[in-house]
Image (tube, coloured by chain):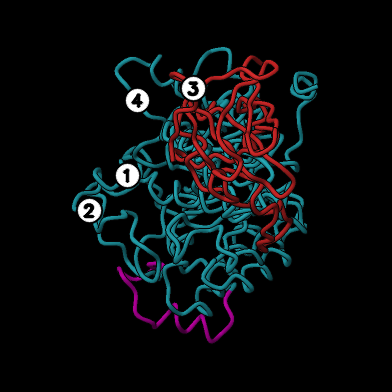
Chain colours: A cyan, B red
Amino acid sequence: MFIVDTDVHNYWSSAEVLLPYLEPYWRDFLVRGEKPGPKGSFPHGHRPWLHPEGFSRHDIRPQTEEDNYLIMKEKHLDLYDIDVAILTADEPLEASTLANYHYANALVKAYNDYMIDWWLPKDRRFKGSIIISPTDPHGAAAEIRRLGAHKDIVQVLASHGSQRPYGDPFYHPIFEACAEVGLPFAIHFGGQGGVNHNAIASGPTTYYWETHALLSQPAMTHVVSMISNGVFEKYPDLYFVVIECGVSWVPSLMWRLDANFKALRKETPWLKMLPSEYCRRNIRFSTQPLEQPQNVKHLWETLEHMDGQNTLLFASDYPHWDFDAPTNIHIPPAWRDKVMGLNALEVYKRIEAPAAASARVA
Amino acid sequence: MTANAAAVPVRGRTFACKVNEVAVGQPRIVAFGRMSIGIFQLDDGYAALLNICPHRAGRLCEGPVCGTTRPTDRAEFVYERAGEIVRCAWHGWEFEIRSGKCLVDDRLKARTFPVEIVGGDLYLELGR
């Protein structure tokens, strides 16, 4: 089976791997500046809740920078015969929490260069994400244009914690750049704290698992904002990928949106289709973490309402604590070929389809 | 607003109300037994709609008579067709008063009735 894993986290041993990629002024910031953790931490405005065990699986314990790759190769890429792994970084997503957007831009720029230099050449299966700091949309657009033509870069990635909903015209320079270079715009769980809004609409939660269960809240806001602000009329070929935000909330949100739009369409006369039709055409959702009801058929019935066979993309979230193995993902058997890999070919145009996969797509 | 009309057939039509009882922007709701119909005065004549929305059976004709925004390609608001649209009183779905066509769902159409004016009287063809 052709497998595209759309959420593989490439760690580093220390944020100091970025030093060779930073201009002298920002190198001093990283070496001597204040940080939220010990030496080697990545700077960010820290979130109010913490995972009590750390984010990573406890069987993943790299000692060196090289270990990060070798363990991933042994325990994930080779073990599950992954064909394509889309790298989604880790700490760099948190750059969007910094008030100093100049520093944030310098950090994500350094990360992108490090990722292209160090990670992409390691393995033919790797594809990269350009990490941006959306607090400065014009800076983000410049970064997208700087690297957007790279043959192994497949998407633009931001945190789902943000200062405002992503459909806001403030962010449209980012989508203009994405459309120009032909890359999807993706958001990934994270980036709460600092200048970004909290994950939880009513105020901060207390516990990590409590917070994690509510990770869909900002994603819901972004999905609605992207549709209602007409991003997909302005950029009809743009794919918006929602990573690690759950999926079973999508159908009920679309039901509500369609009904409300029918009553109040005059508010947004630039929309030509129902909200659910934009969602089906332009938005894709990663599977992990897939909800786990007592009776899996309840989940499957829900996913049918979002055309899950065509709108879901497999993700493992390697090597995080809530990892989903490709062999143990609870989707309808008839959907497996599409969800595990073929759907990704529509979104990530630079992923080369194997001959067998091409035949099935056709 | 509601009037009980004497159902007096005239050439296959039913008397609804006096013409001067219907004002622009103020539909007159007339009951025929258990059936309720809204009669509207438009710029160029009169129209009648069954007072039941095909969406969720709301009081279609008791909502605001208004216009709507023209479909656009950017953030601009072009208000047009003023007086040609009724928004259902319950959920706000928009309908063309003349045709009963639903603006937000092609599959739905509000039932319309032909209107005839004879002197100062307004008649509806209820049998269609």
Mark 4 on the same chain as mark 3? no
Mark drawn on residue A205: 2
Query: Distance between the Cα atoms at labels 3 and 2?
Result: 59 Å
Is residue A32 on the magenta stretch? Answer: yes
Q: Which range of residues does the magenta coloring cover?
A: A22-42
Displayed quadrant of residue A277 = top right
Q: Quadrant of residue A198?
A: bottom left
> Which residue position holds label 4?
A292
Q: In the rendered image, which residue does mark 3 sit on? A: B32
Estimate the x, y position of residue A227 in percent, counting from the top left.
Answer: 58, 49
- The reply to whether callout 1 and callout 4 are in contact (CB within 8 Å) is no
**Chain where mark 3 sits:** B
Secondary element type, mark 3: strand
The chain letter for the residue carrying disc 2 is A
Q: Nearer the viewer, residue A298 or A109?
A: A298
Counting every numbered tag in the picture gives: 4
For the residues beneath circles 1 and 4, the answer to whether they share a chain is yes
